[in-house]
Amino acid sequence: MFGLLVFLLLAYLPTRNVAMLKKKAPYILGMLAIQFALGLVMLKTPVGKYVIDGLSTGFEHLLSYAHEGTAFVFGGLVDYKADATSGTPFFLNVLTPIILISALIGILQFAKVLPLIIRYLGLALSTITGMPKLESFNSVSSAIIGQSENFIAIKKILPTLPEHRVYTLSASAMSTVSMSIVGSYMVMIEPRYVVAAIVLNLFGAFIVVSLLNPYEVAPEDDVFAPPPQKKQSFFEMLGEYILDGARVALTVAAMLIGFVAIMALINGIFSGLFGGTTFQDVLGYVFAPLAWLTGVPWNECQTVGSLMATKLVTNEFVAMLSFTEQNPGGPLQLSHRAEAIIQTFLVSFANFSSIGIIAGAAKSLAPVQGDQIAKFGLKLLYGATLVSFISATVVGLIS
C-alpha cells in the first residue's frame, strides 16, 4: 500500500494542481477500486480462471494454426508436426503468428464488429473514468489495433487537438499493447498476467493522466465521430492486414536483434571493466527500491529490478526472454509474488523506442502534433512507466 501511494504521488508531483485533484479524486478512487476488483476476479476466482483459461486456449489454437503456415513456408526449419510452443526458432515460433492475428483483426474490422466494440466500450469507459469520449475511445482502440495504427482512426481530428489532449492519447497508446502481439506474449509469460495487465493498464493510464496531466473539456468539444471505413473489397483488406502483420513481426525481430546484441556488448564491456558485474546488474541495483515498492521480496529485488530496467531501455520482448528457453541459464525462477509482479509490469509499450514510434505515427498525420509528442517524450515515458508500476503493485497486493 505504501508503494501504491508513492507511485500515485510521483504522478501528482509534476503538476501539483490541487483544484483539479479535488475534481478528479472521486474518479481516481473509483478506478483504483475497479482495478482491485477486476484483479481479484481475474486472478483469484474460478470465473476469472475460466475466462483466462479460455482466452489462453483460444490463442494456443491460433498459434497452432499460424504454425501450419509457418511450417509450409520455412520447411525444414520447422517441425511440421510439432505444436506451436515447441522449441523452434524464436522468430518462427513467437513472431510469425502476429501475421495471422493481424489478419483476424482486419476481418473483424471489415465485418464492423471491432468498431462496435470500440464504440460501446469507449462510451462505458468515459462514464467510469470521467475522461472525454475521444480519449476513452482511443484507449480501447489502442488496446486492440495498436499504438500507432490507432492514430489513423482520428487523423481528421488530430491536427486540431491541443497538447494536453495529445499527451493523454499518447499515454494510452504507450500503456496498452496491440492484440496482434498478445499471443506472442502468452508464449513467453503466463497468460493470466498478460490479460490482467491489459485490463489494469487501461484504467491505470487514466489514473496517471488524471494526476500528471489533468484537464477538463467543454461539452461542445467532447464529441467523437468514428471515421468511415475505407472502401475495400474483402481480399484487398485481407492482404493489407496480412502485410501489416508481417511488418510488425519483422520490426519486432529487427529490434530484438539490435537490442539483444547491444545489451550483450554493453554487458561485456561492464563485465571486463568491473570484474564480472554487468550493465544489467547495475540497472538491477538502481531499480531494486522501485521493485521493492511494488511488493517484490527484497532478496529478489535486484533480479526483478534488472528486468524492469531492461524493458525500459530496450523493450518488453527482451525482458520476457528471461522466462523462456532462450534465456542462457534456462527460464528464470522467481517466487510466485515476484513473478506475478514483474510479468504484469512487462506487458506494455512503455520504453524509449515507443517514443519514436508514436511521435513518428502522429507526425505522418499531423506534423505539429508529432513534434509535440517528441518534445514531451520523456514525460510520456515517465507517465506510462508509472502505469506499469501501479498495475504491478495492484497484482502484488492480491497475489
Image (cartoon, helix red, strand yellow):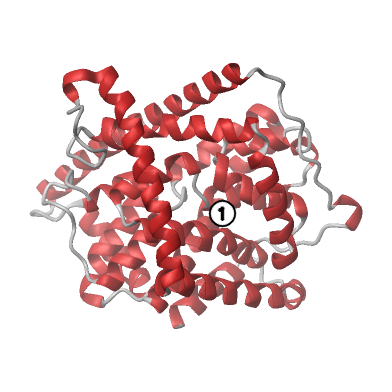
Q: Is residue 67 left or right of residue 393?
A: left
Q: Where residue 356 appears, x then y in whole percent?
A: 51, 37
The answer to whether residue 187 is above or below residue 72 is: below
Secondary structure, mark 1, is: helix
Q: Is residue 213 above or below residue 374?
A: below
Q: How many marks?
A: 1
**In which quarter of the view is residue 345 placed?**
bottom left
| Depth order, front residue of 222/186 | 186
At 62% from the left and 50% from the top, the residue drawn is 140
Q: Is residue 203 above or below residue 229?
A: below
Outermost right residue = 220
Side (left or right) of 393 relative to 359: left
Q: Which residue shows up at 59% across the image and 32% down it?
A: 361
Classify the position of the C terminus by image quarter.
Answer: bottom left
Residue at 71%, 63% in the rendered image: 214
Name the residue carrying label 1: 379
- Could you tell me residue 327's position as x and y percent? 17, 47
Image point (36%, 56%), residue name: 191
The spot of residue 112 in percent (x, y) is 68, 36
Mark 1 burial class by Cα count in 10 Å: few <14, some 14-19, many 20+: some
Image coordinates of residue 40 in percent, x first then y, are: 46, 75
Classify 32 as above or below 238. Answer: below
